[in-house]
Image (spheres, helix red, strand yellow):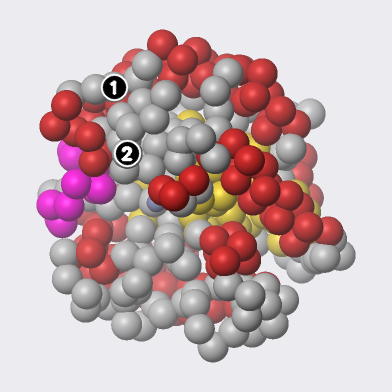
Amino acid sequence: METVFTVDGHCDTMLRVMNDPDFDFFAKNSSGHLDLPRLKEGGVNLQIMALFVEKRFKPFQALPRTLEMAGAFHRLLDQCREDVTLIEKTQDLEEIARDSKRKGFLMALEGAEALCSSDVLYSFFKLGLRLITLTWNQRNQLADGVGESCTGGGLTHLGRELVQEMNNLGIGVDVSHLSEKSFWDVAEVSRKPLIASHSNAYNICDHQRNLKDDQISAIVESQGIIGINFCSFFLNKTRQTSIEDILLHIDYLGKGWGFDCIGLGTDFDGIGYPPTNLQDISRLPGLFKKLKECYGEEVASKIMGENWRRVLHAVLPSS
Ligand SMILES: [Zn+2]
């Protein structure tokens, strides 16, 4: 099998680790989308693992729940240290790029309800947190999510402060799930490449979770990245899609803005209906093959992981 540096910018597998007593991350499972054997099969070099805080814990239990999930993430890592590096700085990226047998896991947070001050943010930075999706669809103390769009709210004062602090520390700012007003506030405040870890193009599929053309332009201007989401609802608003629907979004972004802004953000284990021929993370080599046929090896490699690598180099601390 031909190898390519492969990055998936978003999965919710930690949710399974927390909630499904029958799930074994280290065995190949017949259900769900992602585990260590299937990451190996799929040739994934770097997996960004989101800590998704469920609605029932918000707002008052969000901090203990997020800490609990961070603990479970580290427990998982401790069990696979011989295979996996925690990605905290640019040198860690280099390490996994040099050694194709090693994988990297990067800790992300989806929904920042736990982050009530810059000192709390710093605590999570010390625990290894390196990417933050500021909101899920709801409003929180930092910003409004896309589900609050009708109220027109954007980044709060604390949201602005923490985005700047994230820039300083070396934590990526993820704009997926934000309301449009929040998005534009982040674009104004943040000095680092914007990351939409798991969103698609609104002009191809007019779902509220997808990005309008002017948002795409802002991400491209910041030299950021858009991780293509494999959720069928965000690809064509139905439950039935195939790899071709992913290609429609990639083609639209690539031909409109160039291929440097495109990565993968599968949303595996957070979605119900992945494309029929991309049912789990082990199937990514099929996507690489298809991308090579369409755009050639260099562009295909950028989409599979080189663009994520470039953006993370610009965002993460160097030491
Ligand atoms: Zn999400």
Q: x, y (%) of residue 288?
A: 45, 71
Check the image and name the residue furthest to the bottom.
30
Residue placed under numbered mark 2 in the picture? 138
Residue placed under numbered mark 1 in the picture? 154
Distance from mark 2 CB to nearest ligand 1 atom below 8 Å: no
Q: Is mark 1 on a helix, strand or loop?
A: loop
Magenta stretch, overall SS: loop
Quick one: 122 or 18, which is closer to the camera? 18
Q: x, y (%) of residue 20?
A: 58, 72
Quick one: 315 or 305, which is closer to the camera? 315
Question: Which quadrant, please, contains the C terminus?
Answer: top right
Q: Distance between the residues labelled 1 and 2?
A: 12 Å
The residue positioned 16% from the left and 26% from the top of the image is 151
The residue positioned 55% from the left and 28% from the top of the image is 115
Q: x, y (%) of residue 10?
A: 49, 54
Magenta region: which residues? 204-217
Q: Does the magenta stretch include residue 58?
A: no
With respect to residue 125, does 196 lie above or below? below
